[in-house]
Image: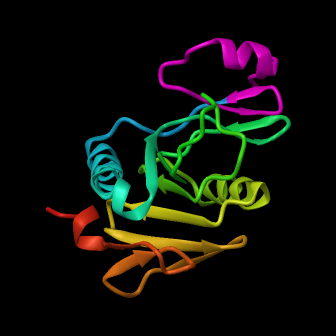
C-alpha cells in the first residue's frame, strides 16, 4: 500500500503543480482534469460569466485555489465571486458560486466530499455539471438535486444560466 508524503501549507502554497492539486490536511490530492468535454464545458461556463461580469456584478475564475478550512484547500473548476473581486491570490472568503465539472474518473464520494467542504466554508451556490450526460445538479447543503428545467440558477435566483449555453454540441 502506498503512503502519501505530507506537505505543509507553506510548501503547498509556495509550489506550482501540473496539474494543480487540492491540499487536504497535509496530503496533495490529484484532481481529474484534462479531457476535451470537461475543458469545453469549463470554458463555456467561465465565458458565460465573463461576458456578463459587469451586468451581474460578478467575476469568474478558472482553477483558483480556495482555502476552505485551516488545513484544506480546494480548486473548483470555476469560481464566481461578487464584484469587486477579492484582492488575495488564494481566496479565503466563501465565493458566490463554486462549480465542479465531472470527469469520467470522478467518484460520487469524492464529489460529495468536495461539496461538503464548500458547504462548510459557507459557499452559497454549488453546482455540479456533467459533460457526458449533459446534466446538472444544484447542491443545497450536503444534498444534490438534479436540474429539471432548461437552466441552472443560483438559490437567490439572481443568476440563471441556460443549459444549452453550457452543453452546446
Judge left or right: residue 123 versus residue 96: right
Taking depth in this image into account, of 123 and 25 the one nearest to the observer is 123
Picture residue at 76% right of the left edge, 27% below the top = 27
Figure check: 72 above or below 3: below
Q: Quadrant of residue 45?
A: bottom left
Identify the residue shown where x is 45% and y is 42%: 61
Query: Foreground residue, 67 or 83?
Result: 83
Q: Is residue 102 visible to us here?
A: no
The rendered magenta stretch, by its main secondary structure, is classed as loop
Q: Say which quarter of the image contains residue 163.
A: bottom left
The image position of residue 125, as x and y in percent, is 59, 66
- Residue 153, quarter of the rendered image: bottom left
Q: Residue furthest bottom?
A: 149
Residue 41 lies left or right of residue 145; in this view the side is: left
Q: Is residue 119 toward the left or the right of residue 31 in the image?
A: right
Where does the magenta region start and end? 1-28
Q: Quadrant of the C terminus?
A: bottom left
- Answer yes or no: is residue 19 visible: yes
Spot occupied by residue 16 in the image (x, y as percentages of width and height): 56, 15
Residue 7 locus on image (x, y percent): 78, 17
Give the residue furthest to the left: 169
Residue 165: within the magenta?
no
Residue 137: percent from left, percent from top: 49, 72
| Residue 22 forms part of the magenta stretch | yes
- Quadrant occupied by the N terminus: top right
Residue at image location 48% in from the left, 19% down from the top? 18
Amino acid at each position: 500500500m502506498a503512503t502519501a508524503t505530507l506537505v505543509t501549507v507553506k510548501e503547498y502554497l509556495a509550489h506550482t503543480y501540473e496539474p494543480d492539486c487540492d491540499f487536504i490536511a497535509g496530503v496533495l490530492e490529484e484532481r481529474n482534469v484534462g479531457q476535451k468535454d470537461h475543458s469545453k464545458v469549463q470554458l463555456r461556463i467561465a465565458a458565460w460569466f465573463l461576458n456578463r461580469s459587469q451586468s451581474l456584478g460578478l467575476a469568474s475564475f478558472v482553477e483558483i485555489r480556495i482555502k476552505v478550512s485551516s488545513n484544506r484547500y480546494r480548486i473548483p473548476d470555476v469560481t464566481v465571486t461578487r464584484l469587486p473581486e477579492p484582492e488575495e491570490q488564494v481566496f479565503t472568503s466563501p465565493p458566490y458560486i463554486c462549480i465542479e465539472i465531472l470527469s469520467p474518473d470522478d467518484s460520487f464520494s469524492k464529489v460529495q466530499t468536495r461539496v461538503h467542504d464548500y458547504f462548510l466554508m459557507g459557499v452559497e451556490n454549488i453546482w455540479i455539471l456533467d459533460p457526458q450526460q449533459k446534466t446538472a445538479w444544484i447542491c443545497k447543503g450536503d444534498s444534490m438535486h438534479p436540474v429539471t428545467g432548461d437552466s441552472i440558477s443560483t438559490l437567490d435566483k439572481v443568476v440563471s444560466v441556460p443549459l444549452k449555453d453550457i452543453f452546446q454540441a
